[in-house]
Image (cartoon, helix red, strand yellow):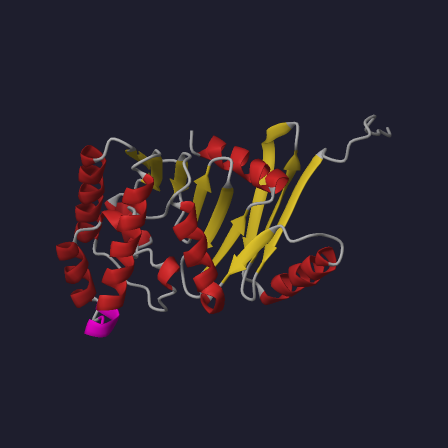
Amino acid sequence: MFYYLDRTDSDVFINSLMVSDVAALTSEGLSDNKDIYRSYMTENKLEVDYYRRKFEGLIDLSEKMIDVIGVDNNQQRKKFLKEDMKTAGKRTNILSTPPIYTISDELLRKILRRNDISAEDGKRIQSYIHNERDRVLSIMEHSRLEDHIPEVSRIDYDKKPVFLSLSGLFYDKDIFYTYDEYIEHLSSAQEFQDKYENYSLIVRNDLDYRNIQIFIHENEWVMISKNKSPAIHFIVRHPVMRRNLEEMLEAIAR
């Protein structure tokens, strides 16, 4: 049996590739069937090298489609998010932990002390979290924000402990919760939801994101962030690529 596609357009297949020095994310699927779509992320050096060479070859054939943000160019990300918070539009986030901007200062100090974080680093972390909270509150003055997080039972936690999400700070040490601290932060996030009409927190038993977080500004951009050191962020704004990712991720968030 032999088959061919009797159509002249070139958008039958969806393919995307994102590469940094330490990780690569590739996705593929069919544009007419969003159920047939898969993504693969690797930190294997040989695979990352292959995808980097493939990426460099594609660069010669195309215009820039994504921004890859590491610690050296994080100012670019900060500027982008600062400008974006003024733009209306629903935000949907798929997170690995309760959102960092919902943690109380008291709980944060307790976690930092138990993890032996220096006073100087503690101030940096607290300042970062306060800035994130201010940014989110500014967004919610005009737009809805919806956070999806995985449900973590005691058994799940004992198998795979949860750590504070500080990828935007590029902090190089994992700061772990105890399970009781995790539950306390979850309670704070639920109180945050009760306080702000434009905010929703959805705890899901069908998510298992621990090292990846996904941020969607509907019809504007998608950002995929790797949490653990070394942190990396992929910001997708190209219309076709962004729309394909957005539709796939929105399906996950339903």
Above or below, 2 relative to 95:
above
Residue at 27% x, 67% y is: 124
Residue 150, how many percent across, how many down? Answer: 34, 41
Quarter of the image with the N terminus in it: top right
User: Viewed as shown, does residue 181 lie left or right of 48?
Assistant: left
Residue at x 17% of width, y 38% of height: 191
Q: Is residue 69 above or below residue 136?
A: below
Instruction: Report the number of discs.
Output: 0
Q: Is residue 65 above or below residue 206?
A: below
Image quadrant where one finds the C terminus? top left
Magenta-drawn stretch contains 55: no
Residue 110 at x, y percent in the picture? 14, 61
**Which range is magenta?**
117-122
Q: Residue at x 42, y 40 (%)?
A: 87
Main SS of residues in magenta: helix
In the image: residue 238, left or right of residue 5: left
Whole-percent x and y of residue 11? 72, 34
Whether residue 152 is visible to the viewer of this picture, yes or no, is no
Q: Could you tell whether 113 is left or right of 66 in the image? A: left
Q: Nearer the viewer, residue 152 or 217?
A: 217
Magenta-drawn stretch contains 121: yes
- The image quadrant of residue 75 is bottom left
Which residue occupies the foreground of this view, 95 or 122?
122
**Residue with the most extreme right position:** 2
**Which residue is situated farthest in the left direction here?**
106
Residue 107 horizontal/vertical position (percent): 15, 55
Query: Does residue 110 appear anywhere in the picture?
Result: yes
**The quadrant where residue 162 appears:** bottom left
